[in-house]
Amino acid sequence: QVQLVESGGGLVQPGGSLRLSCAASGRVFGIDHMAWYRQAPGKERELVARFSGTSEISYTDSVKDRFRISRNAARNTVFLQMDSLKPEDTAIYYCRMLGSRLDSWGQGIQVTVSS
C-alpha cells in the first residue's frame, strides 16, 4: 500500500513563499502523474499543478507564474514551490500520485496566507 506524506505547509504573509513536499512510501510502481490539488473552505477541490509523463506540466490559471511543480522521480517525491502567495491561496493542499495500478492521495496540509 502506497502512502503519501506531505510537509512544508504553514502560515505565511501575503507575498511570501512556501515549498510543499510529498513523498511516497511503500511499494511504488509506475507513477504516471504527480499532482497537487487544493480545497478552500466552502469550495470544491481543484487541480493546482500536474506533472505528467516525463515532462508535461500544467497549472491552473490562478497560479501560473507564481507556483512551480517539480519532482524527484527516483525518490518518488513531488514538490510545489509557491511564491507571491495571496490570501486566496489559503486552502488545504493535497498531493496525488496516479498510475495504471495506483491512485493515492496525501492526508492534506494546511496553507494559510494572512497578515
Image (tube, rainbow, N blue to C red):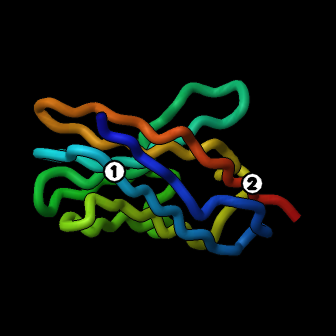
- Whether residue 29 is visible: yes
Q: Dividing the picture into quarters, in which one does residue 39 lie? A: top right
Asked whether 115 or 102 is in front, the reply is: 102
Q: Is residue 77 left or right of residue 16?
A: left
Element carrying mark 2: strand
- Residue 16, how many percent across, how many down? 69, 74
Q: Residues within 10 Å of mark 2 (few under 14, many from 20)?
A: many
Which residue shows up at 71% across the image and 73% down it?
Answer: 15
- Whether residue 60 is visible: no
- Residue 83, how many percent across, how many down? 57, 72
Disc 1 from disc 2: Cα separation: 27 Å
Q: Residue 25 got which mark?
A: 1
- Which circle's residue, 1 or 2, is located before the other in the chain? 1
Q: Is residue 44 left or right of residue 14?
A: left
Which residue shows up at 63% across the image and 73% down it?
Answer: 17
Q: Residue 112 got which mark?
A: 2
Q: Is residue 111 left or right of residue 11?
A: left
Quadrant for the N terminus, please: top left
The amino acid pointed to by label 1 is Ser
- Residue 66, how many percent across, how many down? 51, 68
Q: Residues within 10 Å of mark 1 (few under 14, many from 20)?
A: some
- Whether 104 is drawn above or below 78: the answer is above
- Residue 74, how many percent across, how many down? 19, 67
